[in-house]
Amino acid sequence: MNIENGFRFIDLFCGIGGFHQAMANLGGICVFACDIDASCRKTYEHNYGIMPAGDITKIHEEDIPEHDVLCAGFPCQAFSKAGKRMGFADEAKGTLFFDILRILNYHQPKYALLENVRNLASHDGGNTWRVIHDSIVESGYNVLDEPVIFSPHYIGIPQHRERVFIMCVRKDIGTVPPFVFNESNISPCSVDDILLDEDEIENLAKYKLSDDQITWINNWNTFIRGINCAKLPGFPIWADSLCALENNPMVANWDNLPKWQQNFISKNNELWMQNIKFIDNWLKEASKCPLFFGAKAKLEWQVGNIKNPDIWEHIMQIRPSGLRVKPGTYFPALVAITQTSIVGKRKRFLTPRECARLQSFPDSFICDKKDSQAYKQFGNSINIKLVDLFARYMFGDPEIRHRYSKESQCPEKNPSSSKKTKSISDNGPTLFDSFDY
């Protein structure tokens, strides 16, 4: 393998290769990958011909090949809002950042591109970010003072998935100029961009909603369309609390309930009192559906107050907190479980291939044969187009640097400025100078 015509990169916590796909597209050659998940390693090998190593904590840094770029979407459970948010106190996963650090310190690659969940930026009052930032600087790298938070839907990919991106440039190579994004410049999104036609889906029936599921969702649609209130409820609707307070079994333990739960019970009770006849009749009908119990007897309407609401026009998720309904503009973030979205207008779940498209994987990508594993893997992955964007910015691509400069994103604040944004290449050689893309 001739590596002189490209740059060498390593892919830590590689998953199914979101970083790999983007870096290879830019001319990079992967010289090392690792991931603790055996299923991910198999998928990675099927697609890239490389079998990743396993647990990074058991890999000696001197055994890792020399490389120009270190890539790492390090595990997020210790920082995610969905986890316990223990940060560096989580010895199992939070400290894995320091495995990145020991590799950086030993190999001193020219660049490192890291990614994590949005909550990393604010975790522990910002202390977690400060530790990460200062550790990278002490290792000999320039990095922006504040984490960059970005989502695929900002650039027209229909998935709302805010993530922190950390661009690290070795100090002798150059700096990282401020990355600016004005949210008024968000590109239009359409879920249709990633949806397959029904005749393209193998075993379509597997992804279609069952008759009971359609009946269950129709019941909630009847509720949303028939309720009489000043504006549609933004608080969770709990069917068990749509009743008189004295008939609500949770009220017996009222003083021990957290304030937020007391608040939701009170709001449900008020809604019931304003619509007693309609809700009582609705509950009788909804209760006939065998699925109407537990979490499925709860609704989270997150579409806002709109005229002629129709659940089937939107995106749904079946969550422990209830049936969550979001605007049909873009999908909520894929998650690392089989809890995939329902496409209302298609009355079916997203397929693994559509999840792949939401993460910008090409249709040639070989998914895990088990849907449950495929959903998990794409939920854990990184969006390829965002890796491409931030890699190019970090490497010094003049076009990308200019696009995300203050003068481009906020031109009204710089009416007389015609100076181009300073790029890494102003401070020394970059990958864009050294390699042919």
Image (spheres, rainbow, N blue to C red):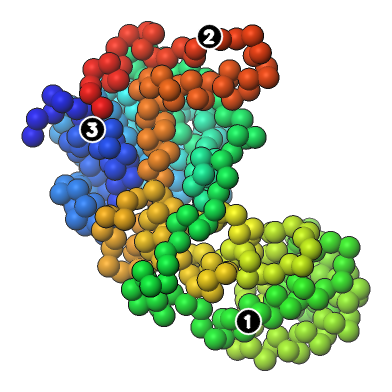
Q: Give the residue pinned by disc 1.
A: 216
Q: Earlier in the sequence, mark 2 or mark 3?
A: 3
The amino acid type of the residue labelled 3 equals: Gly
Which circle, 2 or 1, is nearer the viewer? 2
Q: Secondary structure at mark 3?
A: loop
Image point (63%, 22%), residue name: 410
Image point (38%, 73%), residue name: 199
Image point (81%, 87%), residue name: 281
Which circle, 2 or 3, is nearer the viewer? 2
Disc 2 to disc 3, how far (Cα)?
31 Å
Q: Earlier in the sequence, mark 2 or mark 1?
A: 1
Q: Is residue 284 above or below residue 306?
A: below
**Residue 28 badge:** 3
The amino acid type of the residue labelled 1 equals: Trp
User: x and y percent of residue 431 in the render?
Assistant: 28, 20
User: x and y percent of residue 426 in the render?
Assistant: 39, 8
Disc 2 to disc 1, how far (Cα)?
59 Å
Taking the image as shown, residue 252 lies to the left or right of residue 191, namely right
Q: Is residue 31 above or below residue 213?
A: above
The amino acid type of the residue labelled 2 equals: Lys
Q: Secondary structure at mark 1?
A: helix
